[in-house]
Amino acid sequence: MTKYIIRGGKPLFGEVEISGAKNAAVAIIPAALLVDGVCRIENIPQISDVTLCLKILEQLGANIRTINRHAVEIDCTHIHSTRTNYDLSRKIRASYYLIGSLLGRFGEAEVAMPGGCNFGGVRPIDQHVKGFTTLGAKVMVEGGFIHAFSENRRLKGANIYLDVVSVGATMNIMMAAVMAEGNTVIENAAKEPHIVDLANFLNSMGANIRGAGTDTIKIRGVDHLTGGTYAIIPDQIEAGTYMAAVAAAGGQVLVKNIIPKHMDCITAKLVEMGVSVEEHEDTLLVRRTDPLQKTNIKTLPYPGFPTDMQPQITTVLSLAQGTSLVTEGVWNSRYRYVDELKRMGASIQVDDKTAVVEGVDHLTGAPIQAYDLRAGAAMVIAALAARGESEITGVQYIERGYEDIVEKLRSIGADIRAVEEPDETLESGVG
């Protein structure tokens, strides 16, 4: 068991380099199953979700060769199974992308019901299933596995309208459709940068996808995909998290290796709060010296404010002057972390999808827990800004999506260390 110990109240100064996008990597790696040949994927983040994705592919028969810390070669020519390992698949939400990729190439997939973060709301996959069945597959749940198959092995192109804008369903249907017979049109598609990245990856391997980044994606099915090289985009949410950390703790940090346009939705709100953000070609200089100001935020599908930044920005607003409103417009519930912030002195009241945030003068260090990936990032931000020392447990959630977070924060002046401690339940024989 690992915990983070953070002594807060220190402004942050220096430079931080952003890794490859987690939300792109966990779809692009499963998409390699569609490729008959070797594909080299670069700018891969060193996070636990990526490690799990690669292990699942190896278990299916993929040959994976590590080139360096951020690049791998994946050869899925000799896949020998379309049934994923139950324990591995249950540990990661993105395992559902294996359904689309296996179904698209082999006409069959058996994938354990996905796991990953549970931040209080139901995260259904009904839109995924709607897409697969419209393409001609049959989908059943048996023994904890989602079993999808096409009697003709090859899916048939179709028009698919998503009832709600779903990032996961959009990406999964894209993968299933790239080798389907005929044309597929996905309407009311999500538009996030990682959807465009997945489409660009597939196109670089020989797919024919147009319209990614708009609400209508058109796919002309091809017979096969061949190998190539592709580099994953920088992580919008990781960059936003470090920007939020500077906003909360104060200081000046150059955020490097980003696509500034992807950051516009986050930058705009930080500027409203009194944070200075100076844009360059592939960097943002973030500075906060004056008191933070209140603002209202509603999370929305891209290009709106991302739901994956909601816990971090709520933490920053807990230190802003005045009363702010945060409305969660994507998930039914994403406020489990609020009680942890209250332990530190935050004044936040949650009513259904809205949090009323009354800014306080300061937060105070306390023992706190990370309940999911982004809530964990919020705990780190709160601890960096707080007076005194905080201990954060549940950091395995944080390490699902943030590469070298301890070292990166230390490089910009944070007093943070990771400490290993024994698992008391194992020592006492309880488990």
Image (cartoon, helix red, strand yellow):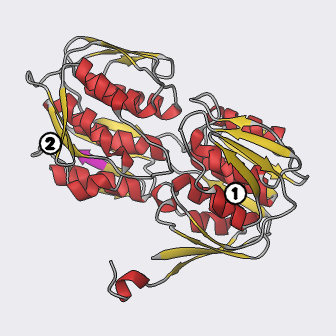
Identified at 37% across, 40% down, the residue is 27
Secondary structure mostly taken by the magenta-highlighted segment of the chain: strand
Q: Does residue 240 sit above or below 91 in this rendering?
A: above
Report the span colored magenta. 73-77
Are the residues flagged by discs 1 and 2 in contact, CB closer than 8 Å?
no
Q: Nearer the viewer, residue 59 or 91?
A: 91
Identified at 35% across, 57% down, the residue is 51
Q: Quadrant of residue 415?
A: bottom right
Q: Residues within 10 Å of mark 1 (few under 14, many from 20)?
A: some
Q: Residue furthest front?
A: 351
Residue 372 picture location, percent across and down: 51, 56
Q: Label 1 is placed on what type of residue?
A: Glu
Q: Is residue 75 magenta?
A: yes
Residue 86 picture location, percent across and down: 21, 54
Q: Which mark is residue 82?
A: 2
Residue 392 picture location, percent across and down: 59, 71
C-alpha span from label 1 to label 2? 44 Å
Q: Nearer the viewer, residue 178 or 139?
A: 139
Q: Nearer the viewer, residue 306 or 230?
A: 306
Q: Label 2 is placed on what type of residue?
A: Thr
Q: Quadrant of residue 362?
A: bottom right
Can residue 133 be seen by looking at this rendering?
yes
Q: Is residue 91 left or right of residue 223?
A: right
